[in-house]
Image (tube, rainbow, N blue to C red):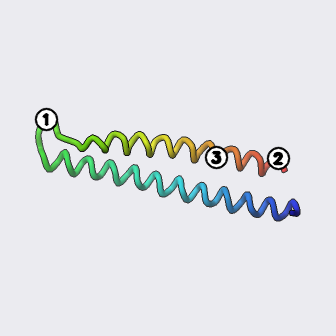
């Protein structure tokens, strides 16, 4: 594998990670919209939210952190080549 090919593959990886991050950020936004819809529909001081809501939010937060770290690693490796 040539250096140019490796650079190209790393560029593809960085692009894929950026797309995954964008999709995850959109999922986080949609989760927030779903929460607001549930709260608005119930219109009470202590709204009920499914137990999975908190788990989904935490999972997306963890995914975004991991994707960001992966992007940093791949970009750093690519810049050192």
Answer left or right for 52 relative to 74. left
Measuring from the top left, give residue 43's x and y in whole percent. Answer: 12, 44
Binning the other alpha carbons within 10 Å of mark 2 as few (below 14), some (14 to 19) or many (20 upward) gives few
Q: Cα distance, mark 3 to mark 2? A: 15 Å
Q: Are marks 2 and 1 in contact (CB under 8 Å)?
A: no
Residue 73 place in picture, x, y as percent: 70, 44
Observer-nearest of 9 and 52: 52
Compared to residue 21, the image places residue 47 above or below, namely: above
Name the image quarter holding residue 7.
Answer: bottom right
User: How many residues crowd mark 3 within 10 Å: few (<14), some (14–19), many (20+)?
Assistant: some
Circles 3 and 1: CB atoms closer than 8 Å: no
SS class of the residue under badge 3? Answer: helix
What residue occupies the far right of the structure in this picture?
Answer: 2
Distance of label 3 from label 1 (alpha carbons): 40 Å
Query: Earlier along the polypeptide chain: callout 3 or callout 1?
Result: 1
Pointer 1 residue: 45
11 in relation to 55, above or below: below
- Residue at (64%, 48%) from the top-left corner? 71
Mark 2, residue position: 80
Q: In this figure, which residue is indicated by the disc labeled 3?
A: 70
Camera-near label (3 vs 1) is 3
Residue 14: which numbered mark, if any? none
| Residue name at image x 31 percent, y 44 percent | 53
Q: Is residue 80 left or right of residue 18?
A: right
């Amino acid at each position: 594998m040539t250096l140019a090919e490796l650079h190209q593959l790393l560029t593809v990886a960085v692009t894929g990670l950026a797309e995954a991050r964008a999709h995850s950020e959109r999922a986080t936004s949609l989760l927030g919209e779903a929460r607001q819809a549930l709260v608005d529909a119930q219109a009470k001081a202590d709204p009920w939210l499914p137990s999975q809501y908190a788990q989904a939010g935490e999972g997306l937060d963890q995914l975004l952190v991991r994707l960001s770290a992966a992007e940093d690693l791949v970009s750093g490796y690519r810049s050192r080549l």
